[in-house]
Amino acid sequence: MQLENSVALVTGAASGIGETTAKTLAAKGARIALVDRDEEQIERVMQDILAAGGQCVAIAADVTSEEDTARFVARTVETFGQLNIAVSCAGIIRDGTMLNLDRETGKVSRKLSLDKWNSVIDVNLTGTFLTLRDAAEAMVNGGWDGLLVPISSVNKIGQVGQLNYSATKAALERFPKIIVGEFLLRKIRHIRCVGIAPGYTETKILTEMNQDALQAILKDVHLGRLIKPQEIADMIAYCAQNEALNATTIEITGGLCFPGNIAK
Ligand code: NAP
């Protein structure tokens, strides 16, 4: 797939991996639909891309809303006449162990709330499903070559304190196999799906993590530092250009050797 003149829709584009991916694809000649619930910040990203000579549109939307996903896909196609790449970066964490015990009594003092559970499932899993489903619908009906990119995580393996988050990322890791299998069944040959499973990457999402746990995890990273969003964005751009990559999820972890089970 040529990035020049292709059209890419990126959710979570107001920050972190989504922002850098949008800017990277724009710098390679793709026209970009920026989607995020943070209106002010996608406006900022849009101005950056325009100032660098790129083409883009900013669409404020909530990926958990079926109305919104239909709207931002339709708006992308109206604006640019096609859709080729959909990268689902919108994601959140709401960490906490399933049970917390009172130190003195040993009895359960607090449980992971349904609100924390549902919010992570809604954004990470349902939001990605809706985004990729509606993007794929447009690609099929338009007959355009396409690439769908769900963002999993190294924590798909199961991270203590992230029952909700790890559950969504484990599910997303499976999306490419299932979606491409279904495309094969339906003789849809022109759309690929490649997942990305980043390791610990320098974005604001990590500020919500327990910082002691993060420092402990970094000791197990061969690279010895956080991954840069640019390193993830470059891989996404490469995935678009290499058609042999399909129906798989690629880990970029900097060599995280012992993932999972950091007790806190
Ligand atoms: P980030 O900097 O926090 O960016 C995520 C963006 O998604 C934010 O702008 C956020 O807005 C937006 N968003 C959240 N809920 C949304 C919704 N319902 N509708 C529309 N936009 C929404 O995080 P990031 O690190 O770039 O994360 C991008 C993806 O990579 C996520 O799926 C994350 O799980 C995954 N990932 C990150 C890491 C890492 O270490 N950073 C590692 C593995 C995987 P708000 O600020 O309003 O929430």
Image (spheres, rainbow, N blue to C red):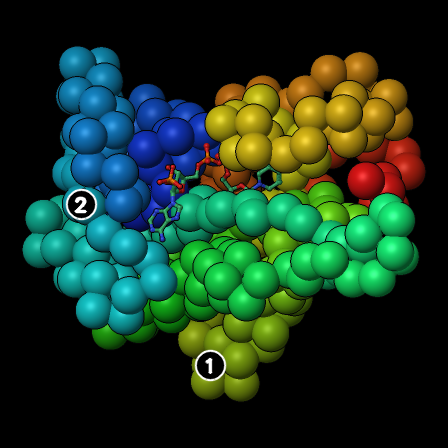
List x then y, in percent, for residue 69.
26, 62
List x then y, in percent, for residue 156.
72, 54
Q: Which residue is under mark 1?
A: 187
Residue 132, by quadrant, is bottom left
> What amino acid type should be assigned to the residue bearing mark 2?
Ile
What residue appears at the point 17 percent right and 52 percent down from the top-left corner? 76
Residue 206 numbered tag: none
Query: In the current view of this chain or complex, which residue is farthest to the left?
Result: 78
What residue appears at the point 42 percent right and 26 percent down from the top-left corner? 20
- Observer-nearest of 190 and 55: 55
Residue 263, by quadrant, is top right
> What amino acid type should be assigned to the residue bearing mark 1?
Lys
Q: Which residue is under mark 2?
A: 59
Q: Is mark 2 within 8 Å of ligand 1?
A: no
Q: Left or right: where does residue 40 sit relative to residue 128?
A: left
Closest to the camera, between mark 2 and mark 1, is: 2
Query: In the current view of this chain or complex, which residue is farthest to the bottom?
Result: 185
Mark 1 crowd level (few <14, some 14–19, many ≥20, 10 Å Cα): few
Q: Looking at the image, can residue 198 be seen?
A: yes
What residue appears at the point 23 percent right and 18 percent down from the top-left corner? 48
List x then y, in percent, for residue 212.
76, 25
Image quadrant holding the C terminus, namely: top right
Mark 2 crowd level (few <14, some 14–19, many ≥20, 10 Å Cα): many
Q: Left or right: where does residue 65 sit relative to residue 107?
A: left
Q: Left or right: where does residue 176 sit relative to residue 71?
A: right
- Observer-nearest of 136 and 264: 264
What residue appears at the point 20 percent right and 56 percent down from the top-left corner? 72
For the residues labelled 2 and 1, the Cα–Cα distance comes to 32 Å
